[in-house]
């Protein structure tokens, strides 16, 4: 049995959570003031995910890069593989907000989308 302490990010309250793990499974969560806390602790301790944000070079744009993010969370352990998959990737202007720039990033099933519009020069 192990005990883990976390700060919940499921809502603005930022509850201090205590989770009990037995054989890799969360058996108890305390400290949460809403149901989001328990869901967050279970997910974070057994299968953590993150939204990846970065920038990509843009060709022929009115700015040198475009900000991007994954359309959904990717497994935390895949972050470096996702960044490696983006090495050398560039896009051409124009780009619209929400436009898919890379599909199935690093075989995660998650797309990479633009978070800013970039016009042509």
Image: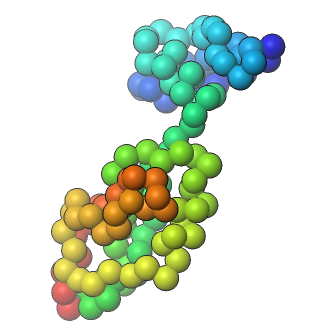
Identified at 63% across, 8% down, the residue is: 28
**Residue 69 location (% of width, % of height):** 38, 58
Is residue 95 toward the left or the right of residue 39 in the image?
left
Is residue 11 toward the left or the right of residue 100 in the image?
right
81 shown above or below 3: below
Identified at 30% across, 69% down, the residue is: 101
* Front in this rendered view, residue 119 or 51: 51
Is residue 73 toward the left or the right of residue 98 in the image?
right
Q: Quadrant of the N terminus?
A: top right
* Front in this rendered view, residue 92 or 8: 92
Asked whether the viewer can see residue 26, the reply is yes
Identified at 38% across, 53% down, the residue is: 110
* Front in this rendered view, residue 79 or 65: 79
Q: Quadrant of the C terminus?
A: bottom left
Identified at 58% across, 62% down, the residue is: 81
Asked whether the viewer can see residue 8, the reply is no
Is residue 80 toward the left or the right of residue 32 in the image?
right
Locate residue 10: give its quadrant: top left
Q: How is the image coloured?
A: rainbow
Locate residue 44: give its quadrant: top right
38 shown above or below 43: above
Number of numbered labels in the structure image: 0
**Residue 36 location (% of width, % of height):** 43, 18
**Residue 116 location (% of width, % of height):** 27, 66
């Amino acid at each position: 049995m192990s005990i883990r302490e976390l700060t919940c990010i499921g809502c603005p309250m930022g509850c201090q959570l205590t989770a009990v793990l037995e054989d890799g499974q969360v058996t108890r969560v305390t400290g949460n003031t809403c149901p989001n806390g328990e869901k967050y602790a279970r997910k974070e301790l057994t299968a953590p995910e993150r939204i990846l944000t970065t920038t990509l070079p843009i060709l022929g744009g009115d700015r040198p890069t475009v900000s991007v993010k994954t359309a959904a969370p990717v497994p935390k352990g895949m972050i470096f593989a996702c960044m490696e998959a983006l090495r050398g990737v560039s896009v051409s202007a124009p780009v619209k907000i929400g436009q898919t720039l890379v599909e199935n990033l690093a075989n995660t099933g998650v797309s990479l989308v633009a978070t800013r519009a970039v016009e042509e020069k």
